[in-house]
Image: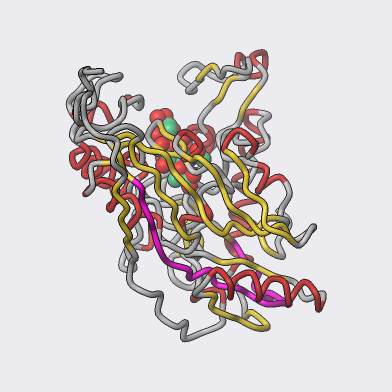
């Protein structure tokens, strides 16, 4: 059969020969400290009782199994970009997931099927897919973190979520002490959620597989702000590298690309999820509040907007923890903040938004030893 591939890949009539390739990013350096403040992007948190690096899947599973057998608490840490650890630290073993490796099977007929080790830095994976002209992860450029963390909270940005391209997630099930692989349809993906997040601690993500299309142009651009930056209409495509560059620029302007010199990036990304409200509740918000109807009948509004309009504009706060100067949804460490300072600010923001709009914001990062 011949045909036209609108995405710019080879037209029909090609062979279905499968080409295998392997990619691996540089090994993670050995940590010089076991303080969580040195291992997380928010730079707060006390010491780990014990810290181990897992550089292979066998090591990862063995460390978790042995700790479970001893009854020792386990904290899995990727890049530490979505976690807030208390100043008391962690009374157990912190297992740093430092596994590496991406293998791809690519054919004109079936596209690219990638399997990525949990510890691979996410943005290096995205960058690699773009260099290979594989479509689907481009709007997820510049997100800090490890690949294994992406299915847990169904990472999303600029109109895409990883659940749209994930084919399967291979895990170690700590409850039943066995490997379990979940198809995407079995992973319970929702907005910033999954079965892996809903049953905290049960599943250790080992590998994530993605199914991507081939071609030089991006998936359809759905986010108005990104389409504007690209100078195209919503619903059109753009060259993959242009999309990556535009997303990186947008993220940078919001303090969402890590930069050790810029305290606006000393954060855990968005500190709260965007609330999903009943339509009656959404109708009570002031005019101008963003409202996005969801397929399940709820209405999503913007946590950043609510925070901003409840009196916590960008830069709010005078202590060592403040609202980011670039985005109301990021709480930041100005240098000397403790976890307690971040928690105090988070409570103030949450309580202020509740008082003003009757909406209780839910934290997005994983909180360790912290109750908000
Ligand atoms: N806004 C304000 N004040 C601000 C910033 C934004 O009022 O200081 C309002 C504006 O009305 C804006 C709206 O908030 O239109 C939405 O802002 P933005 O487009 O920056 O997106 P977001 O909903 O705040 C979400 C994700 C981000 C992701 C961006 C882009 C969540 C919790 N956050 O933020 O993800 O990068 O969309 O797609 O869903 C993360 O999860 O850590 C994260 C950074």
Residue lying farthest to the bottom in this orientation: 32
Q: Give the main secondary structure, helix, strand or loop, of the magenta stretch.
A: strand
Residue 63 lies, with reference to residue 1, above or below; the image says: below
Q: Where is residue 211 in the image (x, y as percent from the top left)?
A: 42, 39
The question of residue 213 being in magenta is answered with no
**Residue 73, picture quadrant:** bottom right
| Residue 250 as seen in the image, left or right of residue 323 | left
Image quarter for ligand 1 equals: top left
Q: Residue drawn at (58%, 20%), measured in percent from left and top?
A: 299
Residue at image coords 71%, 45%:
198
Image coordinates for residue 241, horizontal then vertical, percent: 19, 42
In the picture provided, is 163 more to the left or to the right than 201? left
Q: Position of residue 27 (x, y in %)?
A: 38, 75
Measured along the vertical axis of the image, is residue 298 above or below residue 162? Answer: above
Task: For the N terminus, give its image quadrant.
Answer: top left
Horizontal arrangement in the rendering, residue 308 relative to residue 4 (left or right):
right
**For the point 63% across and 58% down, which residue is it?**
344
In the picture, measured across the screen, residue 220 lies left or right of residue 92, that is left
> Is residue 329 in sight in this rendering?
no
Q: Quadrant of residue 111?
A: top left
Q: Can residue 247 be seen in this view?
A: yes
Q: Which of 63 and 326 is in front in this view?
A: 63
As displayed, is residue 331 above or below residue 6? below
Looking at the picture, the colour scheme in use is secondary structure
Q: Relative to 323, say whether 217 is above or below.
A: above
Quadrant hosting residue 135: top left
Q: Where is residue 24 in the image (x, y as percent from the top left)?
A: 34, 65
Residue nearest the observer in this picture, 300 or 171: 171
- How many numbered marks does the figure carry? 0
Which residue corresponds to the image point at 59% horizontal and 62% vertical from the top-left?
84
Q: What stretch is highlighted in magenta?
A: 84-105
């Amino acid at each position: 059969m011949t045909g036209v591939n609108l995405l710019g890949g080879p037209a029909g009539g090609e062979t279905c020969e499968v080409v295998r390739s392997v990619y691996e990013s540089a090994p993670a350096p050995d940590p010089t400290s076991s303080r969580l403040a040195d291992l997380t992007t928010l730079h707060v948190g006390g010491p780990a009782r014990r810290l181990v690096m897992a550089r292979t899947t066998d090591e990862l599973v063995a460390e978790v199994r042995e700790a479970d057998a001893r009854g020792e608490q386990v904290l899995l840490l990727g890049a530490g970009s979505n976690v807030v650890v208390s100043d008391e630290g962690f009374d157990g073993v912190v297992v740093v997931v430092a596994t590496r490796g991406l293998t791809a099977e690519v054919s004109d007929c079936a596209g690219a099927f990638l399997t990525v080790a949990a510890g691979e830095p996410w943005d290096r994976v995205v960058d690699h897919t773009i260099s290979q002209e594989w479509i689907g992860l481009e709007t997820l450029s510049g997100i800090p973190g490890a690949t294994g963390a992406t299915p847990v909270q169904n990472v999303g940005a600029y109109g895409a979520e990883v659940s749209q391209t994930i084919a399967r997630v291979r895990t170690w099930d700590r409850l039943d002490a066995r490997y379990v692989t979940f198809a995407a349809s079995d992973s319970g993906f929702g907005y910033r959620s999954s079965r892996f997040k809903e049953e905290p601690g049960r599943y250790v993500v080992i590998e994530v597989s993605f199914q991507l299309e081939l071609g030089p142009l991006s998936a359809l651009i759905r986010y108005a702000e990104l389409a504007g930056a690209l100078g195209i209409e919503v619903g059109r495509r753009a060259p993959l590298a242009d999309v990556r560059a535009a997303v990186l620029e947008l993220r940078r302007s919001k303090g969402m690309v890590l930069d050790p010199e810029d305290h606006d990036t000393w954060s855990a990304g968005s500190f709260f999820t965007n609330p999903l409200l009943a339509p009656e509740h959404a109708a009570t918000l002031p005019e101008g509040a963003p409202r996005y109807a969801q397929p399940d009948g709820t209405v999503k509004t913007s946590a950043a907007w609510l925070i901003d309009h409840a009196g916590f504009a960008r830069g709010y706060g005078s202590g060592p923890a403040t609202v980011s100067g670039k985005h109301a949804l990021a709480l930041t460490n100005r240098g000397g903040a403790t976890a307690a300072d971040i928690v105090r600010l988070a409570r103030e923001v949450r309580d202020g938004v509740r008082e003003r709009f009757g909406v209780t914001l839910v934290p997005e990062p994983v909180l360790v030893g912290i109750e908000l």
